[in-house]
Each structure stands twice: as C-alpha cells, then as structure tokens.
Amino acid sequence: MNVFSQVAALTAAAVHVFVWPLESFLYGSPRIRLFLTGSTADAPEVRLWRVNVGFYNLFLALGLIAGVVSLHTGDVNTGRSLIVYVCAFMIAAGIVLFVSDRRLWRGSLGQAVPPAIALAAHFLLD
C-alpha cells in the first residue's frame, strides 16, 4: 500500500476515534449539539445502543491502525487485508447510514469518504 492510501486509512481511523467518545459518553451533552441531528432528550433510553455503536467505531479504527502497523512491521499481506476489509466495511456502513436517514448525509460522508479514498489510492496507484 502506498503512503497516500495509508494516510487516508489513518484519517478514516481518526474520524472513528473522534466519534467514539461523542457517541459513547457525550451524546446527551449540550456541548456536542453541533454534531447531532434531532433531540438528545432520548439520551438515557438509547444509552446502551450508543455505547455499543461508539465502541464499534473505536474497534474499526483500531483495525485500520493495526493494518498500517502490520504493513510497517513486515507483515504486508495481513496489513493490506486488514486495511482493505475495514475500509470496505466503513464504506458500506456509510452507505447504510445515508440510506437509512438522508438527513445524516454529513455523517455518512465522514464515515465513507476517507476509506473510499484509501481504497481508490491503493487500487489505482499501487
């Protein structure tokens, strides 16, 4: 994988690490209202779901980080496989997010575009 695809993969990981605490711990906070659509009035009712989704994003990010680390420690096949799979997963999840509620288009772009750039750079430039 070339440097550009690795940087895009790490950008996708950073987006998911950034979203993790917002979804898992800070969802009901007025300070993060900018990142939300709709009301946070239901925050206590959806707490378990939010924590799970937040950690799901963290684990996806860690998968990309592990892929890049594998590339740089000599296990190129494992690194490439992790990066391609997790990026494809993130793209699919971004599409599902958009299809499920078009008002969340910004979130779906944030979730899908960096990994799409990583895969495009990998398959077109390598």
Image (cartoon, rainbow, N blue to C red):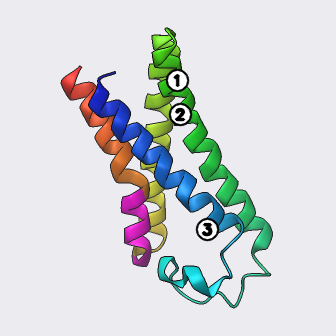
Residue under label 2, please give it: 65
In this picture, residue 11 sits left or right of residue 85: left
Q: CA distance from mark 3 to mark 2?
A: 20 Å
Looking at the picture, does residue 70 appear above or below residue 95? above
Q: Are marks 3 and 2 in contact (CB under 8 Å)?
A: no
**Which label was assigned to residue 53?**
none
Residue under label 1, please give it: 69
Quadrant holding the C terminus: top left
Q: CA distance from mark 1 to mark 2?
A: 6 Å
In this picture, residue 48 sits left or right of residue 64: right
Q: CA distance from mark 3 to mark 1?
A: 26 Å
**For marks 3 and 1 on the same chain, the one whose residue lies earlier in the sequence:** 3
Looking at the picture, does residue 5 appear above or below residue 95? above
Where residue 99 appears, as percent x and y from the top left, is 43, 66
For disc 3, the neighbor class at 10 Å (few under 14, some 14 to 19, many from 20) is some
Where residue 10 appears, as percent x and y from the top left, is 43, 40
Find the magenta span and give its range: 103-110
Looking at the picture, does residue 112 appear above or below residue 101? above
Q: Amino acid at mark 2?
A: Ile
